Image: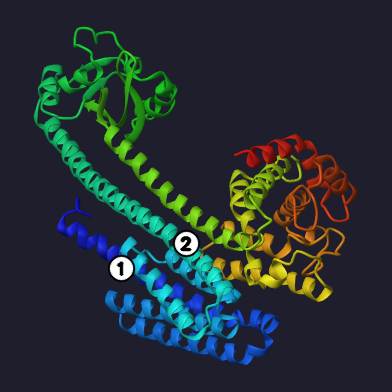
Amino acid sequence: MQSLTHVQKNDFRKMINDLFLQRSFAFYWLGIIFFPLFAVLDYFTVREHFSNFLFYRLCLAFILFVFLLIQRRKNSPRITQLLLFVAYLLGGFTITLMVLQTGGYSSSYYVGLLLISVGCFSLLPLTAKQAAFAGFALYCVYVIPLLMFCQADKENIRIFFNNSFFFVSIVIVSLVECNEEIKARIRKFKLNVKLKSMNKDLTFYSSNLESEVDKRMKKIKESKLRYKELYENIMDPLVVINDKAEIEVANQHFYMMTKQSPINAKGVTFLDIVHPVSRSSVAEKMLPPLLQGRQVRDFQFIMRTGPKKQIPVECNAKQISKKGESIGFQLVIRDISERKRMEKQLLESYNLVDKSRTTAILALAKLAEFRDRDTGDHLKRIREYSKILAEQLGLHPHYENYITRRYIEDIYLSSILHDIGKIGIPDSILLKPAKLTDEEFQLMKCHCVYGGDTLAECEKQTSGQSFLTLGKQIAYHHHEKLNGTGYPFGLKGDEIPLSARIVALADVYDALTSKRSYKPPFSHEHTKELIVTDRGTHFDPDVVDAFLAREDDFKKMRIHILTN
């Protein structure tokens, strides 16, 4: 911010405030929808508290709705930030009330505080200071009632320090992410300002230049000496060629750019100074329209400027006529190296913002994974296995027009969200070392619906199809089976989305080849036999065939992740 002018700082703050306002509406609606929705979890896990908890959730949703209406009327940055902070703390206080009534220190409802924290930091454009203050305030809302109303024995103290360590870790990671995101937004803002200024200057200069050339062309005699006098006063390189593309006359700036001299330029064609990578493009797309009497505007190509040197340029060209007859073609050339450099920096800035978004998504997915001590690098392996299967299926004639490079990138990202719904499963079931009872297993199955519903709500906040579309499909259906005996909906065959069929095999392969509290890891060969046995019943035959074609890649990828 220190390198920005006072006006630019105000513009940047206005941009952040506008973004804050836009994101705040999404923040309120997520709270209004999801807080009452999680009453389903209360009903299955703590039914004795269901009525009280539903009342808490509805009260909070009503308060958030009132804040939303106030914000629509009072469109002020300070009011927006104040209301959001109060809503954030009220959400934390509501969850703390539930924590106090479900075991205090050992309550699994503590995870809700982490969800609020991660959601706030990921959604809102906070500075590091704002994120640190928000994280500290939420921690106080949780800790103070806990210390006041819960008995602190040795086991509770251990759990308390474990929860505190995890909470502080999440806050620290979020601080780094918020700091980097703000830096990236500043860089993007500065590049946009520079690019707008440059384009404005270039447009103004180009317009004046072409206007000046037209005026002088009407006033002076169209001889080579007159052209030379005119061209020497133009700051951009300028050259006149004939219908054979031979150089007739050029100004000093052209000779300086191309490291040529007027004597050496005799008999040299314009194509000789074009870099080989652009020569065919110039010959086929720029020269033919000129010969047909049409103007060429903003044509970009690479020009040679010396031995093993080249620069990107932009050219405006038109035909020059005398008494109705063509006497050549005038080319105004502009060095666009700086513009290309800035475009590259802007692209890098966009990529950095996208990387920050991907990191936040991975952190959200790991919230569910961290609760299961046996999963290890499960998310890393799942996304690599899914990518391998998708790449192989893309070679199949039936899928070659469906599985695009974008699809492979999306499934690589969205596959890690397949078990996000497990965050709604109680620890007593999720972490149980023994076999689950029928009732417990029925509750465990609900993680598919929890995850799918969560991602479906998030998808509504985006325009068009995104990786969240595949994520929703995978979360809902990765436990469906081809013969209709899977869950939660009992879909059959092609009723199951392709993305879910891919992740289903990847998930089973990883589960079988990984150590669990209730079983040792199976070998690759034994796992392959089990998968082939279930071909056409549990798994899609095409997906199984893709697995068999790339099984060596599966083994190599598993070893690579285990050893790194």
Q: Secondary structure at mark 1?
A: helix
Toward the viewer: 251 or 469? 469
The extreme front residue here reads 154
Which quadrant is the N terminus positioned in?
bottom left
Estimate how packed mark 1 is, as few (under 14), some (14 to 19) or many (20 or more) residues with alpha carbons within 10 Å. some
Which quadrant is the C terminus positioned in?
top right
**Which residue occupies 14% across, 25% down?**
231
Toward the viewer: 512 or 374? 374
| Amino acid type of the residue tagged 1 in the rendering | Asn
The location of residue 489, given as percent across then percent down, is 78, 70
Position of 475 compared to 483: left or right? left
Image mark for residue 170 = 2
The location of residue 438, given as percent across then percent down, is 83, 73
Looking at the image, is 411 positioned above or below residue 20?
above
| Amino acid type of the residue tagged 2 in the rendering | Ile
**Which residue occupies 41% across, 24% down?**
278
Toward the viewer: 216 or 204? 204
Q: Secondary structure at mark 2?
A: helix
The location of residue 522, given as percent across then percent down, is 81, 46
Image mark for residue 17 = 1
**Which residue occupies 73% across, 51% down?**
502
